Image (cartoon, rainbow, N blue to C red):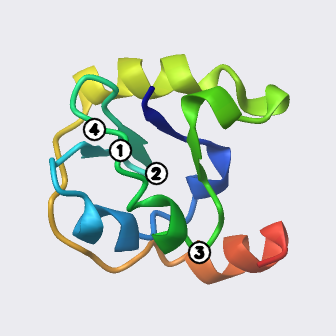
Amino acid sequence: MTYTVVENCDKCKFTDCVEVCPVEAFHEGPTMLYINPETCIDCNACVEECPVEAIFADVDVPEKWEEWTEINAQKCEEYPVITEKQDPLPTAEARKTELGF
């Protein structure tokens, strides 16, 4: 099992999850984060940290976002690892509100 970041992260890029990851499994794209399935140790630490509920265990990803497990694996090959908390995107608070959080 691994964890997956879904589209709720897009236009937010809150990095609270990165700070608690013990194995540096997060990769940073331009508008969101991704979890490397090869690095993730299924510790669940990141799930509670996400303010927009964008992280799911791969077996619990809602059907509408199933493709995101593969997208995470692909994007992790393209983007660098992120290990420290950073400021969210300028669009983060508006996106959070749009998502109902």
Of labels 4 and 3, the one closer to you:
4
Q: Residue at x 30, y 31 (%)?
A: 36
The quadrant holding residue 7 is: top right
Return the disc, 4 or 1, that comes first in the chain's sequence.
Answer: 1
- Is 68 placed above or below 14 here? above
Mark 1–mark 2 contact, CB under 8 Å?
yes
The residue to which callout 2 is attached is 32
Q: Quadrant of the C terminus?
A: bottom right
Question: Do the residues under discs 4 and 2 have CB atoms within 8 angstroms?
Answer: no
Q: Amino acid at mark 2?
A: Met
Q: Which residue, given by chain and number where applicable, does mark 4 sit on?
A: 41
Q: Residues within 10 Å of mark 3 (few under 14, many from 20)?
A: some
Amino acid type, mark 4: Ile
Q: CA distance from mark 3 to mark 2?
A: 13 Å
Residue located beneath label 1 in the image: 29
Residue neighbourhood size for the residue with mark 4, other residues' Cα within 10 Å, grouped as few (<14), some (14–19), many (≥20): some
* Above or below 20: residue 42: above
Quarter of the view holding residue 29 = top left
Q: Nearer the viewer, mark 4 or mark 1?
A: 4
> Residue 2: horizontal and vertical position, in percent?
43, 31
Which residue is label 3 attached to?
Answer: 51
**Is the C-beta separation of discs 4 and 3 under 8 Å?**
no
Q: Nearer the viewer, mark 3 or mark 1?
A: 3
Q: Quadrant of the N terminus?
A: top left
What element does badge 2 sit on? loop
The earlier-in-sequence mark between 3 and 1 is: 1
Mark 3 / mark 2, whichever is N-terminal:
2
Image position, residue 9 (x, y; %): 57, 55
| Foreground pick, 80 / 4 | 4
Q: What residue is rendered at 47% in x and 38% in y?
A: 3
Q: Separation of disc 1 and disc 2 at Cα?
A: 5 Å
